[in-house]
Image: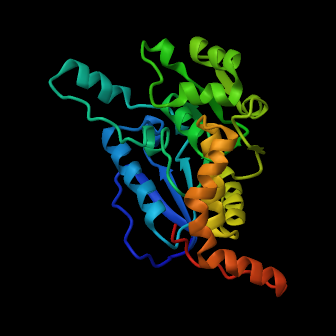
């Protein structure tokens, strides 16, 4: 692991561990293994602050989230939820960016989910809205909320139907059935399944390194263009928004000029941190 220097220090954490596989990659590990990495109210705030820091720290380009132990994240902390129903304690609202700061996140920089095991409820909702998903061959995915009398309200339901279609979305959210990793890949919910002799986190770092070698400006704008279409904006409207909105800023920036110059000079480009 690297020990990079930052313009601002990362937020303090109690329920997650943070590390830096390379100076440009943030690795966030959910660290409540005995609770299957279920996220409590304080954990949501902690994660929301971490992802905001990722977006604002110029030296970082990609984030990765994974879990400690046999679970990625089994969802909400139902013990905390139950306690809030039986006493005067009121559960605080999760961040506007959603469950774990991810399920409704718009954000600026890409985040990869390295799903190492159980991925249920809010954990699944997070992966539906991240940018790339790699899964261990033992990973399992599901929305068991209907079996607990609750509803997946962190943003997954409307997003799920855009990824897998109405019938498959209904199958998942009405039955609460579990998907194995390979089936989740077939449905388009997972980019790649990692074999038993490989580490899903190590594979995610490889993917993150590939992304971080590209122009940080181009990555941010390309991600925004895809996200606009996925969130429901029409192709012409989305393209017009990019051309008139964010594109002039990348056109005036250093990295576009550097990329073209490096190509002409037949050398590797020397990117600068994005100012977008």
> Residue 82 lies in what quarter of the image?
top left
Pick whichever, 234 or 122, lies toward us.
234
The quadrant holding residue 128 is top right
Vertical arrangement, residue 163 with respect to residue 168, above or below: below
Q: How is the image coloured?
A: rainbow
Residue 22 visible in the picture: yes
At 68% across and 58% down in the image, what residue appears? 202
Residue 271, placed above or below residue 222: below
* Residue 249 picture location, percent across and down: 56, 68
Residue 115 seen from this side: no
Q: Residue 168, image x and y in percent?
A: 69, 19
Tell me the quarter of the image containing the N terminus: bottom right
In the displayed structure, 235 sits above or below 91; it is below
Could you tell me which residue is drawn at 59 percent across and 66 percent down?
Answer: 248
Residue at figure coordinates x 55%, y 71% from the top left: 274
Q: Is residue 102 left or right of 224 when viewed as pictured?
A: left
Residue 275 falls left or right of residue 42: right
Q: Nearer the viewer, residue 78 or 112?
A: 112
The image position of residue 236, as x and y in percent, is 68, 43
- Hey, which quadrant is residue 44 in on the image? top left
In this rendered view, identify the residue nearer to me: 16 or 188. Answer: 188
Is residue 15 rendered to the left or right of residue 187? left
Residue ranking furthest to the left: 88
- Toward the viewer: 239 or 18? 239
Relative image position of residue 214 (x, y in whole percent): 70, 68
């Amino acid at each position: 692991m690297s020990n990079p220097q930052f313009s601002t220090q990362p937020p303090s954490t109690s329920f997650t561990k943070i590390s830096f596989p390379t100076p440009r990659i943030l690795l966030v590990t959910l660290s409540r293994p005995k609770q299957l990495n279920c996220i409590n109210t304080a954990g949501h705030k902690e994660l929301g602050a971490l992802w905001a820091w990722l977006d604002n720290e110029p030296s970082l380009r990609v984030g990765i989230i994974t879990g400690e132990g046999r679970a990625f994240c089994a969802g909400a902390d139902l013990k905390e939820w139950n306690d809030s129903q039986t006493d005067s304690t009121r559960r605080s609202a999760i961040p506007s960016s959603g469950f774990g700061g991810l399920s409704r996140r718009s954000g600026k920089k890409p985040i990869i989910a390295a799903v190492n095991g159980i991925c249920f409820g809010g954990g699944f909702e997070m992966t539906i809205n991240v940018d790339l998903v790699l899964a261990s061959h033992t990973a399992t995915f599901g929305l068991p909320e209907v079996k607990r009398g609750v509803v997946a309200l962190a943003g997954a339901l409307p997003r799920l139907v855009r990824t897998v279609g109405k019938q498959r979305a209904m199958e998942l959210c009405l039955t609460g059935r579990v998907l194995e990793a390979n089936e989740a890949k077939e449905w388009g919910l997972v980019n790649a399944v990692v074999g038993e002799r490989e580490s899903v986190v190590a594979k995610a770092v490889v993917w993150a390194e590939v992304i971080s070698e590209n122009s940080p400006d181009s990555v941010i704008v390309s991600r925004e263009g895809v996200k606009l279409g996925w969130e429901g904006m029409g192709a012409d409207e989305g393209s017009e928004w990019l051309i008139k909105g964010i594109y002039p800023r990348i056109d005036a920036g250093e990295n576009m000029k550097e990329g073209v110059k490096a190509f002409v000079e037949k050398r590797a480009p020397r990117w600068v941190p994005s100012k977008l």
